[in-house]
Amino acid sequence: QKEVEQDPGPLSVPEGAIVSLNCTYSNSAFQYFMWYRQYSRKGPELLMYTYSSGNKEDGRFTAQVDKSSKYISLFIRDSQPSDSATYLCAMSAYDTDKLIFGTGTRLQVFP
Amino acid sequence: DTGVSQNPRHKITKRGQNVTFRCDPISEHNRLYWYRQTLGQGPEFLTYFQNEAQLEKSRLLSDRFSAERPKGSFSTLEIQRTEQGDSAMYLCASTPTGLAGTYEQYFGPGTRLTVT
Protein backbone atom coordinates (compact mmCIF):
# COMPACT_ATOMS: atom_id res chain seq x y z
CA GLN A 1 0.00 0.00 0.00
CA LYS A 2 1.29 3.45 -0.92
CA GLU A 3 1.69 6.03 1.85
CA VAL A 4 -0.37 8.52 -0.17
CA GLU A 5 -3.30 7.53 -2.35
CA GLN A 6 -4.80 9.79 -5.00
CA ASP A 7 -7.34 9.04 -7.72
CA PRO A 8 -5.56 9.56 -11.07
CA GLY A 9 -8.74 10.65 -12.87
CA PRO A 10 -9.17 12.10 -15.38
CA LEU A 11 -11.76 14.37 -13.87
CA SER A 12 -13.70 16.30 -16.51
CA VAL A 13 -15.91 19.25 -15.49
CA PRO A 14 -17.59 22.20 -17.23
CA GLU A 15 -16.26 25.71 -16.80
CA GLY A 16 -17.59 27.33 -13.62
CA ALA A 17 -17.99 24.06 -11.71
CA ILE A 18 -16.66 23.46 -8.22
CA VAL A 19 -13.92 20.86 -8.29
CA SER A 20 -13.04 18.60 -5.38
CA LEU A 21 -9.69 16.81 -5.35
CA ASN A 22 -8.74 14.41 -2.58
CA CYS A 23 -5.92 12.36 -1.10
CA THR A 24 -5.76 9.82 1.69
CA TYR A 25 -2.65 8.83 3.57
CA SER A 26 -1.54 6.21 6.02
CA ASN A 27 1.39 7.79 7.90
CA SER A 28 0.13 9.55 11.02
CA ALA A 29 3.48 11.40 11.29
CA PHE A 30 2.62 13.64 8.35
CA GLN A 31 2.23 17.23 9.55
CA TYR A 32 2.64 19.39 6.46
CA PHE A 33 0.30 19.11 3.49
CA MET A 34 0.69 20.68 0.08
CA TRP A 35 -1.04 20.89 -3.24
CA TYR A 36 0.92 21.37 -6.44
CA ARG A 37 -0.32 22.02 -9.96
CA GLN A 38 1.61 20.57 -12.85
CA TYR A 39 1.05 21.40 -16.49
CA SER A 40 2.17 18.92 -19.10
CA ARG A 41 5.96 18.64 -19.32
CA LYS A 42 6.48 21.35 -16.69
CA GLY A 43 7.66 21.30 -13.09
CA PRO A 44 5.14 21.27 -10.22
CA GLU A 45 3.93 24.68 -9.04
CA LEU A 46 3.10 25.13 -5.36
CA LEU A 47 -0.55 26.15 -4.88
CA MET A 48 -1.36 25.68 -1.23
CA TYR A 49 0.16 24.38 1.98
CA THR A 50 -1.35 23.73 5.36
CA TYR A 51 0.04 22.64 8.69
CA SER A 52 -1.87 20.03 10.67
CA SER A 53 -5.69 20.06 10.53
CA GLY A 54 -7.90 22.87 9.34
CA ASN A 55 -8.84 24.93 6.33
CA LYS A 56 -6.94 27.47 4.29
CA GLU A 57 -8.33 29.66 1.54
CA ASP A 58 -6.50 31.51 -1.23
CA GLY A 59 -8.64 33.08 -3.92
CA ARG A 60 -10.56 30.34 -5.70
CA PHE A 61 -8.67 27.59 -3.87
CA THR A 62 -9.48 26.06 -0.48
CA ALA A 63 -7.37 23.37 1.16
CA GLN A 64 -8.75 21.18 3.93
CA VAL A 65 -6.94 18.74 6.18
CA ASP A 66 -8.65 16.19 8.41
CA LYS A 67 -5.90 14.40 10.31
CA SER A 68 -8.32 12.23 12.25
CA SER A 69 -9.47 10.69 8.96
CA LYS A 70 -6.07 11.02 7.24
CA TYR A 71 -7.79 12.84 4.40
CA ILE A 72 -6.97 16.07 2.58
CA SER A 73 -8.91 17.99 -0.03
CA LEU A 74 -8.46 20.82 -2.49
CA PHE A 75 -11.51 22.70 -3.72
CA ILE A 76 -11.44 24.91 -6.80
CA ARG A 77 -14.33 27.31 -7.21
CA ASP A 78 -15.44 28.78 -10.54
CA SER A 79 -13.11 26.46 -12.43
CA GLN A 80 -11.55 27.77 -15.64
CA PRO A 81 -10.12 25.98 -18.70
CA SER A 82 -6.71 27.28 -17.58
CA ASP A 83 -7.07 25.13 -14.45
CA SER A 84 -6.74 22.04 -16.66
CA ALA A 85 -3.63 20.34 -15.30
CA THR A 86 -2.52 17.54 -13.02
CA TYR A 87 -2.94 18.26 -9.31
CA LEU A 88 -0.52 16.59 -6.95
CA CYS A 89 -0.92 16.31 -3.22
CA ALA A 90 2.27 16.09 -1.17
CA MET A 91 3.04 15.76 2.49
CA SER A 92 5.92 15.50 4.91
CA ALA A 93 6.57 14.64 8.51
CA TYR A 94 8.05 17.08 11.02
CA ASP A 95 11.48 15.43 11.16
CA THR A 96 12.19 15.16 7.45
CA ASP A 97 12.31 17.46 4.46
CA LYS A 98 11.36 14.92 1.83
CA LEU A 99 7.94 15.25 0.28
CA ILE A 100 5.81 12.19 -0.38
CA PHE A 101 3.59 12.77 -3.39
CA GLY A 102 0.37 11.22 -4.59
CA THR A 103 0.18 10.04 -8.18
CA GLY A 104 -1.69 13.18 -9.23
CA THR A 105 -5.24 13.75 -10.52
CA ARG A 106 -5.62 14.96 -14.08
CA LEU A 107 -8.28 17.67 -14.31
CA GLN A 108 -9.92 18.83 -17.51
CA VAL A 109 -12.15 21.90 -17.49
CA PHE A 110 -14.05 22.30 -20.73
CA PRO A 111 -15.65 25.58 -21.93
CA ASP B 1 14.61 36.11 -8.61
CA THR B 2 14.17 33.98 -11.69
CA GLY B 3 13.16 30.75 -9.99
CA VAL B 4 14.86 27.38 -10.04
CA SER B 5 16.58 26.63 -13.33
CA GLN B 6 17.66 23.28 -14.71
CA ASN B 7 19.87 22.36 -17.63
CA PRO B 8 19.60 20.74 -20.01
CA ARG B 9 15.84 20.61 -20.42
CA HIS B 10 16.02 17.48 -22.51
CA LYS B 11 18.68 14.80 -22.80
CA ILE B 12 18.68 11.77 -25.06
CA THR B 13 21.44 9.28 -24.45
CA LYS B 14 22.34 5.74 -25.30
CA ARG B 15 22.29 3.01 -22.71
CA GLY B 16 25.60 2.78 -20.91
CA GLN B 17 26.53 6.44 -21.31
CA ASN B 18 27.02 8.85 -18.41
CA VAL B 19 24.89 11.97 -18.08
CA THR B 20 25.06 15.01 -15.81
CA PHE B 21 22.30 17.47 -14.99
CA ARG B 22 22.63 20.87 -13.39
CA CYS B 23 20.28 22.71 -11.04
CA ASP B 24 20.54 26.37 -10.02
CA PRO B 25 18.30 27.07 -7.03
CA ILE B 26 16.61 30.32 -6.14
CA SER B 27 19.32 32.60 -4.79
CA GLU B 28 19.81 32.40 -1.02
CA HIS B 29 17.86 29.15 -0.80
CA ASN B 30 20.00 26.92 1.36
CA ARG B 31 18.20 23.66 0.80
CA LEU B 32 18.15 21.89 -2.53
CA TYR B 33 16.30 18.70 -3.44
CA TRP B 34 16.32 16.21 -6.30
CA TYR B 35 13.26 14.18 -7.29
CA ARG B 36 12.51 11.80 -10.12
CA GLN B 37 9.14 11.58 -11.85
CA THR B 38 8.02 8.89 -14.26
CA LEU B 39 4.96 9.09 -16.50
CA GLY B 40 1.71 8.96 -14.58
CA GLN B 41 3.40 9.09 -11.18
CA GLY B 42 4.13 11.78 -8.64
CA PRO B 43 7.73 12.87 -8.00
CA GLU B 44 9.84 10.55 -5.86
CA PHE B 45 12.46 11.94 -3.50
CA LEU B 46 16.09 11.16 -4.34
CA THR B 47 18.29 13.34 -2.13
CA TYR B 48 18.68 16.76 -0.57
CA PHE B 49 21.37 19.22 0.50
CA GLN B 50 21.66 21.80 3.22
CA ASN B 51 24.27 24.13 1.74
CA GLU B 52 27.01 21.76 0.53
CA ALA B 53 26.14 18.91 2.91
CA GLN B 54 24.13 16.00 1.51
CA LEU B 55 21.77 15.20 4.38
CA GLU B 56 19.56 12.42 3.11
CA LYS B 57 19.58 9.92 0.26
CA SER B 58 16.75 7.69 -0.86
CA ARG B 59 17.19 3.98 -1.34
CA LEU B 60 16.16 4.75 -4.92
CA LEU B 61 19.54 6.40 -5.39
CA SER B 62 21.66 3.46 -6.53
CA ASP B 63 25.46 3.65 -6.61
CA ARG B 64 25.23 4.72 -10.25
CA PHE B 65 23.76 8.03 -9.10
CA SER B 66 25.78 10.75 -7.45
CA ALA B 67 24.83 14.28 -6.52
CA GLU B 68 27.02 17.18 -5.47
CA ARG B 69 26.61 20.74 -4.36
CA PRO B 70 30.25 21.80 -4.03
CA LYS B 71 29.90 25.43 -3.01
CA GLY B 72 26.41 25.36 -1.62
CA SER B 73 24.95 27.03 -4.70
CA PHE B 74 24.23 24.98 -7.83
CA SER B 75 24.01 21.20 -7.76
CA THR B 76 24.78 18.44 -10.24
CA LEU B 77 23.23 15.00 -10.53
CA GLU B 78 25.25 12.42 -12.44
CA ILE B 79 24.01 9.05 -13.63
CA GLN B 80 26.67 6.59 -14.70
CA ARG B 81 26.09 3.66 -17.08
CA THR B 82 22.54 4.75 -17.82
CA GLU B 83 19.81 2.13 -18.16
CA GLN B 84 16.47 2.38 -19.92
CA GLY B 85 14.78 2.40 -16.53
CA ASP B 86 16.49 5.71 -15.79
CA SER B 87 14.26 7.43 -18.36
CA ALA B 88 12.27 9.97 -16.38
CA MET B 89 11.89 13.65 -15.56
CA TYR B 90 14.50 14.76 -13.02
CA LEU B 91 13.23 17.63 -10.92
CA CYS B 92 15.12 19.99 -8.68
CA ALA B 93 13.54 22.07 -5.92
CA SER B 94 14.82 24.59 -3.41
CA THR B 95 13.64 26.16 -0.20
CA PRO B 96 14.95 28.74 2.26
CA THR B 97 16.68 27.63 5.42
CA GLY B 98 14.26 26.55 8.04
CA LEU B 99 13.50 23.99 10.66
CA ALA B 100 13.13 20.36 9.61
CA GLY B 101 9.87 19.97 7.83
CA THR B 102 10.34 23.04 5.66
CA TYR B 103 7.61 22.58 3.16
CA GLU B 104 7.63 25.38 0.62
CA GLN B 105 9.65 23.60 -1.99
CA TYR B 106 9.81 25.44 -5.30
CA PHE B 107 10.44 23.27 -8.32
CA GLY B 108 12.33 23.89 -11.51
CA PRO B 109 11.10 22.89 -14.97
CA GLY B 110 12.90 19.55 -14.87
CA THR B 111 15.30 17.68 -17.14
CA ARG B 112 13.66 15.00 -19.24
CA LEU B 113 16.00 12.06 -19.78
CA THR B 114 15.42 9.48 -22.48
CA VAL B 115 17.71 6.46 -22.55
CA THR B 116 17.62 4.57 -25.84
Image: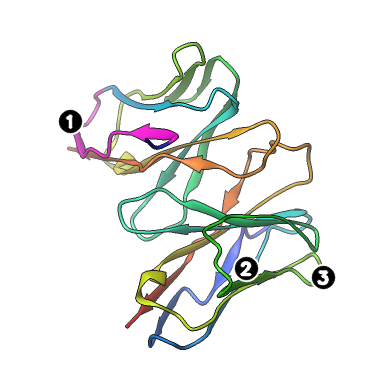
Query: Disc 1 on helix, strand or loop?
Result: strand
The crowd level at tag 1 (other Cα within 10 Å; few <14, some 14-19, many 20+) is some
What's the amino acid at mark 2?
Cys
Query: Residue B71 shows which numbered tag?
Result: 3
Task: Name the element at disc 2.
Answer: strand
Say which amino acid is labelled 1: Pro
| Residue B69 versus residue B99 in the image, above or below | below
Res A62 → quadrant = top left
In this rendering, the answer to whether B69 lies above or below B79 is above
Judged from the image, the secondary structure of the residue bearing numbered disc 3 is loop
Above or below, A95 against A76 in this view is: below
Is A92 contained in the magenta span?
no
Q: Earlier in the sequence, mark 2 or mark 3?
A: 2
Q: Position of residue B41 (x, y in %)?
A: 35, 50
In whole angstroms, how far apart are the C-alphas of marks 3 and 1? Answer: 50 Å
Q: How is the image coloured?
A: rainbow
Q: Are marks 2 and 3 on the same chain?
A: yes
**What range is drawn magenta here?**
A3-17
CB contact under 8 Å: marks 2 and 3? no
Query: Is B94 left, or right, of A67 in this rendering?
Result: right
- Location of the C terminus of chain B (image quadrant): bottom left
Chain identity of mark 2: B
- Which label was assigned to residue B23? 2
